[in-house]
Image: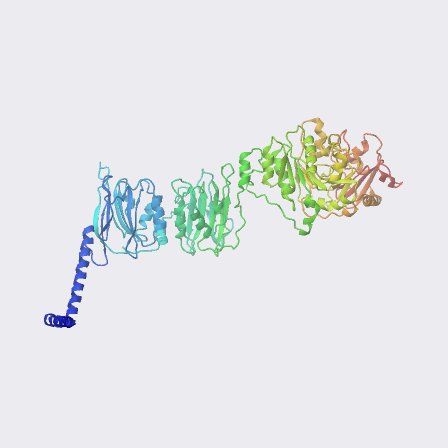
């Protein structure tokens, strides 16, 4: 213990004698540490300076850059005392060798080689998307940099302060120290041209110091506008608008296929057109200042070209200023390399359609940076399903001063029906269904306006469609069936011939069912077999049968629904037909009238299941070996309910065969077909047999006698029958004695009703015909009719 205490006393005496005490000793120790740190700092600085070959004052950074020597020796890039890229490090290559330095921390953040001899897209994508404004670049060429360096890449070098890059030619040396957003001309920049007969420019070797920032750094968008030279084009008065525009007149044109260039007109001047401001294939863009509406930027992005993608377009749009107005026009094709990033940017500018763009589609659009919602100024025109050119777009628009978006995307043709396109590409013969203007129409069912009708039996009744050979007629029929309000596609069945698989695929587009019957030689056989099969596979009390080459009206099912209670209550009624044999333009017109007739009009009809089972089942060859409209003959007489105005339109029938003249008479004359929906029938409560007879007798009895003098005009050229007064009803009692029914046929021809030699008359009820002629009800009552007894004694019989 004493020994230790003595040692401490001796130590204190030594410090006091040598240093004057403990406090001065501490001061000397601190001075020594400070000197050591200062020496280490200068040693480190000298070491860094020696690597780059230069010492720099505080606040500046040293550099040494040597470009490649021909293609044998790679470049060297040294920054702030450290070599980052060189042959020794094996991290250099042909093209632009670039060191990237953070403009805030001054630290190296990346090093890349861009082979702009082969392509410049990698370079463009990197400098546009991967680095922020203010990033410093140190760049050295190796071998060749200009072969694939296009204007966009050179523009981005200018946006880093370059001013000499346009002078650089093939295999010449280039060196740049710049900064993203640096005003042009403020970069450290050198290039060595080739001397005559030399293959390469001599290598550049530079060293020195620079400050960060290198000079004035500005907003990229502003610099882009300064670098973009917008050449004025030809005049187009008011940009094609016929009236004065209280805003900015604009015209857009997508070009004519690949034959003529697109154009964009602003305020009466062409801003982009052929040989003006690089208009052409892909996206043609004009940006207007939000306040002055003056063009501030023009650009074209060829997103068809395989060596490019839409990154440049995406970056261009991202860098726009708030409020900038963007006019876009696509010509030829722009979909091939259009990617999600660019689509999102265009959506953000107000587009609701660009995501639907496909090969060769054309499009125009006017949007705004920061728009709320969607623009209404947009249109897309789809290419055909076989890749042919779309209808071009040419529009003159008055852009309002208070241009605003809408909350809900406007309804424009943006939906592409791919299933329909594939079908049309696969099969010929559907020129109407596959028309380029219609091929993308979506096949949507139409809901009932009156929801209370949804439970009506008619909307649960199966529908059987029996096609013929005409492809367009079948497509028309399926479309009109599908668009009837309240129809359920799963209840519709299309009969398919095994030699026509396209019919089944067409039915599937509408979500209809189908079944095949094999190949049958006659349409009549096909119809009979189909009807038998449909009845067997359903338990419904009714089935609706639709024949070939007709078009259904929207009122088709509603009409049948109103008639159904009478059909259900009257066993003498076999069904409901939507076709009136005598429903010509001149012999029908009472939209709300339904009649009972004794024949079977066919074409589109509802049949009772009980009638089929009692009179047709296992006897189709006897009763129904003809077309339904050509007089099916059932075992027991019965009647059909028929509208005065047909609910179907039968396509005109033409034939060169004299034997078919009666078909031309039946189907070729102009017919009246109802077009409106929800027509309320006025006599549905009097359609049952007893009530109908009472109504008929009452109306015939109250009808005026049609003057026989007027009938003398029949057959004379230039004269037409006239009714004495419109709006009432008239009756003609006539002699109907001979087997050929000569007078009856003559009267039918006289009024324009159906009449064909050697063929029975159509539309009879108890040997009489009721029809609508010039807004007047006419009764033709023959001597065979029980109504003939109602003839007053003073009324003459027409002979």
Q: Provide residue 663's location: percent of width, then percent of height.
A: 71, 31
Residue occupying the far right of the picture: 793
Q: In the image, 584: left or right of 737?
A: left
In front of the other: 366 or 679: 679
Residue 452 appears in the figure = yes
Figure check: 69 above or below 161: above
- Residue under the point 44% across and 55% down: 370
Location of residue 333 by image quarter = top left
In this view, which residue lies farthest toward the front?
Answer: 1
Visible residue check, residue 239 = no
Horizontally, is 477 left or right of 723 in the view? left
Q: Position of residue 780 (x, y in %)?
A: 81, 38
Q: Nearer the viewer, residue 539 or 362?
A: 539
Q: Is residue 336 above or below residue 757?
A: below
Quarter assignment of residue 725: top right
Quadrant (top left, top right, bottom left, bottom right) of the N terminus: bottom left
Q: Residue at x 60, y 32 (%)?
A: 500
Location of the C terminus by quadrant is: top right
Q: In the image, is 657 to the left or to the right of 689?
A: left
User: Residue 59: x percent and y percent?
Assistant: 23, 58
């Amino acid at each position: 213990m004493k020994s230790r205490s003595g040692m401490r006393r001796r130590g204190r005496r030594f410090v006091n004698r040598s240093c004057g005490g403990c406090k001065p000793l501490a001061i000397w120790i601190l001075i020594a540490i400070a000197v050591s740190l200062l020496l280490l700092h200068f040693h480190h600085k000298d070491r860094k300076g020696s690597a780059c070959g230069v010492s720099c004052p505080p606040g500046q950074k040293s550099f040494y850059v040597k470009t490649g020597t021909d293609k044998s020796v790679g470049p060297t890039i040294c920054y702030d005392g450290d070599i980052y890229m060189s042959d020794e490090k094996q991290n250099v290559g042909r093209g632009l060798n670039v060191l990237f330095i953070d403009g805030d921390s001054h630290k190296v953040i990346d090093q890349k080689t861009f082979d702009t001899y082969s392509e410049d897209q990698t370079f463009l994508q990197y400098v546009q998307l991967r680095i922020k404004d203010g990033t410093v670049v140190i760049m050295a060429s190796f071998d060749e940099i200009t072969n694939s360096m296009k204007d966009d890449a050179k523009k981005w070098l200018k946006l880093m302060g370059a001013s000499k890059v346009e002078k650089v030619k093939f295999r010449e040396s280039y060196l740049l120290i710049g900064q993203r957003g640096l005003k042009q001309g403020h970069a450290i920049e050198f290039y060595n041209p080739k001397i005559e007969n030399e293959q390469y420019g001599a290598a550049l070797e530079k060293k020195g110091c620079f400050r960060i920032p290198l000079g004035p750094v500005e907003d990229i968008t502003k610099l882009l506008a300064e670098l973009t030279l917008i050449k004025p084009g030809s005049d187009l008065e008011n940009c094609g608008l016929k009236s004065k525009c209280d805003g900015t007149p604009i015209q857009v044109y997508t070009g004519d296929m690949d034959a003529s260039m697109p154009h964009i007109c602003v305020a009466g001047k062409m801003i982009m057109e052929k040989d003006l401001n690089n208009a052409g294939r892909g996206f043609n863009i004009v940006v207007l200042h939000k306040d002055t509406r003056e063009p501030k930027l023009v650009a074209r992005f060829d997103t068809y070209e395989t060596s490019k993608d839409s990154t440049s377009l995406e970056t261009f749009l991202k860098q726009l200023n708030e409020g900038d107005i963007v006019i876009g026009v696509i010509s030829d094709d722009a979909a091939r390399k259009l990617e999600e990033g660019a689509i999102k940017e265009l959506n953000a500018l107000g587009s609701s359609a660009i995501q639907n763009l496909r090969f060769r589609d054309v499009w125009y659009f006017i949007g705004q940076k920061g728009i709320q919602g969607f623009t209404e100024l947009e249109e897309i025109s789809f290419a055909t399903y076989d890749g042919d050119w779309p209808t071009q777009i040419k529009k003159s628009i008055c852009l309002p001063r208070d241009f605003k978006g809408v909350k809900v995307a406007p309804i424009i043709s943006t939906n592409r029906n791919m299933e329909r396109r594939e079908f049309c590409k696969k099969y010929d013969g559907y020129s109407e269904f596959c028309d380029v203007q219609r091929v993308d129409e979506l096949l949507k069912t139409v809901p009932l306006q009156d929801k209370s009708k949804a439970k009506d039996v008619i909307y649960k009744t199966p529908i059987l469609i029996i096609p013929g050979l005409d492809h367009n007629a079948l497509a028309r029929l399926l479309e009109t069936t599908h668009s009837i309000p309240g129809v359920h596609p799963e209840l519709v069945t299309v009969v398919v011939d095994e030699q026509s698989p396209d019919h089944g695929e067409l039915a599937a587009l509408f979500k209809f069912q189908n079944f095949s019957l094999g190949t049958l030689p006659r349409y009549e056989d096909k119809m009979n077999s189909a009807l038998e099969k449909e009845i067997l596979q359903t338990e419904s009390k009714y089935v609706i049968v639709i024949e070939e080459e007709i078009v259904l009206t929207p009122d088709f099912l509603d009409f049948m629904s109103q008639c159904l209670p009478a059909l259900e209550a009257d066993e003498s009624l076999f069904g409901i037909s939507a076709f009136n044999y005598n429903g010509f333009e001149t012999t029908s017109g009472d939209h709300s009238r339904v009649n009972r007739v004794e024949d079977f009009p066919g074409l589109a009809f509802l049949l009772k299941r009980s009638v089929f089972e009692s009179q047709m089942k296992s006897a189709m060859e006897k009763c129904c070996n003809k077309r339904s409209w050509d007089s099916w003959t059932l075992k027991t007489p019965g009647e059909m309910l028929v509208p005065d105005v047909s609910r179907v339109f039968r396509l005109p029938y033409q034939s060169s065969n004299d034997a078919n003249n009666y078909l031309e008479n039946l189907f070729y004359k102009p017919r009246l077909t109802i077009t409106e929906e929800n027509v309320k029938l006025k006599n549905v409560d009097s359609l049952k047999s007893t009530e109908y007879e009472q109504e008929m007798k009452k109306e015939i009895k109250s009808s005026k006698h049609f003057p026989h003098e007027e009938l003398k005009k029949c057959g004379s050229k230039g004269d037409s029958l006239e009714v004495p007064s419109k709006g009432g009803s008239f009756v003609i009692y006539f002699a109907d004695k001979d087997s050929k029914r000569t007078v009856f046929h003559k009267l039918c021809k006289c009024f324009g009703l159906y009449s064909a030699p050697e063929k029975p008359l159509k539309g009879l009820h108890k040997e009489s015909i009721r029809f609508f002629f010039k807004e007047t009800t006419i009764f033709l009552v023959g001597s065979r009719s029980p109504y003939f007894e109602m003839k007053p004694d003073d009324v003459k019989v027409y002979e």
